[in-house]
Amino acid sequence: MLHNIGLLALDQHLPDALTEAIDAAGRRGTSLARVERELLGFTDTDLGASLAARWHFPRPLVKATQGHSAPLTELPDRHSLTAFVIHARMFTRSYGLPTGLSLDRPALDEEEPPAASEWTPPPLSGVLQQQGGMEHMLERAQAFMRGAAIA
């Protein structure tokens, strides 16, 4: 969720502009970032990184917030926190789960997410099986989120 802090800020402070950008991206079949830059002059990742820097988050978190939607091929360090966030988004999307917005799908200027089968060879498949499979992991994540909402 931290990587989408800019989306959360837009949703809270400029909901009409965010809705307009989402609708336009869907109609045009282009990325939300491209439309945000046209309409707002910045992207949700720009905003998220600015907020993270303003709040004195550690530099790797600021960079991961800024770069979480970049193609892996553009990263100077494929072992950085940014790369891990991108991999986590790709993994999540490979199971058909959103990583932010309901329109969360690869756009024209994003890398295609890998098929779910890319994530199933060992050792990940063994870990998933050990934990009760993806359905059990999702149940645990939902239980955590319910608990976090109460706290």
Image: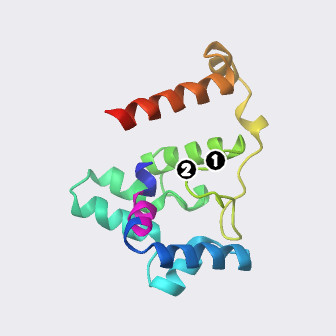
| Vertical order, 151 against 140 (above or below) | below
Q: Is residue 121 left or right of residue 34?
A: right
Which residue does the image show at 70% across and 34% down from the upper left?
Answer: 119
Relative horizontal placement of residue 124, taking residue 121 as reference (left or right) = left
**Is residue 83 highlighted in magenta?**
no
Q: Residue at x 63, y 42 (%)?
A: 92
Q: Give percent across and percent down for residue 103.
A: 66, 61
- Within-10-Å neighbours for mark 2: few <14, some 14–19, many 20+: many
Question: Does residue 124 show up?
Answer: no
- Check disc 2 and report the residue beneath it: 86
* Residue bounds of the magenta highlight: 5-11
Locate residue 143, reporting x and y percent.
50, 27
Residue 107 sits above or below residue 75 on the image? below
Q: Which mark is residue 90?
A: 1
Which quadrant of the view contains residue 91?
A: top right
Real-space Cα separation, disc 2 to disc 1, in angstroms: 6 Å
Q: Which mark is residue 127?
A: none
The residue shown at (52%, 78%) is: 36
Q: Position of residue 126 (x, y in %)?
A: 67, 17
Q: Amino acid at mark 1?
A: Met
Q: Are marks 2 and 1 in contact (CB under 8 Å)?
A: yes
Q: Secondary structure at mark 2?
A: helix
Q: Amino acid at mark 2?
A: Ile
Q: Is residue 1 left or right of residue 51?
A: right
Image coords of residue 8 (percent x, y): 42, 60
- Position of 34 relative to 77 (above/below): below
Q: Work out whether residue 135 or residue 58 is closer to the camera in this orientation and state it.
A: 135
Front position in the image: 20 or 66: 20
- In the rendered structure, the answer to whether residue 147 lies left or right of residue 129 reads left
Determine whether the residue tagged by mark 1 lies in a helix, strand or loop.
helix
